[in-house]
Image (cartoon, rainbow, N blue to C red):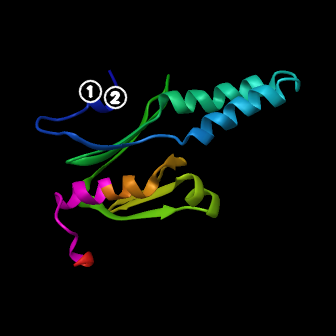
Amino acid sequence: MSYVQDSLAINEQVVGTAHFHWLYRLKAWLALIFLFWLLGYGIYLFFKLMIRYWTTEIAVTNQRFILKQGWFRLNTNEIALPNIEGVKVEQSFWGRLFGFGRVRIEGTGVDAVELPTIANPVEFRRAIENAKFGGVTPPAAK
């Protein structure tokens, strides 16, 4: 079972999840194929990228945002929804074209949490906003 599912409180439900974009896996495979001849550097880079891919969980519940990273060493960032002050989305031209980007979540009393490049960052930001305001239009957008 996943960390997110194991850490849910009573009446807490997952509202949205984020995943790495398919280009992230492509980058790992290209490193393996084209850098293999550099004394195994391609193998090292492939496993470094793929272990990050396999061990990262990003989710928003109806109560908090969760980022879990790590395999042997666990590293989590969790922010209660009322403590989220802002969510920034950064997408390059290619990110807009292929549907990937970075999300930065800023909270009160917490350093900002930078997510790795994910697929559909605008959709994930929308999931955070919907969870934060319970499906009601945010006051600033009215």
Which quadrant: the N terminus?
top left
What secondary structure characterizes most of the magenta part?
Answer: helix
Residue at the extreme left: 11
The quadrant in which residue 94 appears is bottom right
| Quarter occupied by residue 35 | top right
Q: Nearer the viewer, residue 77 or 1?
A: 1
- Residue 129: quadrant of the picture: bottom left
The three-letter amino acid code for the residue at tag 1 is Asp
Q: Position of residue 79 (x, y in %)?
A: 31, 51
Does the magenta-highlighted stretch encompass residue 86? no
- Whether 137 is among the magenta residues is yes
Q: Is 90 left or right of 7, judged from the image as shown?
A: right
The residue at which mark 1 appears reads as 6
What amino acid does circle 2 point to? Answer: Tyr
Q: Residues within 10 Å of mark 1 (few under 14, many from 20)?
A: few
Residue 25 in view in this figure: yes
Q: Which residue is label 2 attached to?
A: 3
Mark 1 secondary-structure assignment: helix
Region of the chain picked out in magenta, as a range? 127-139
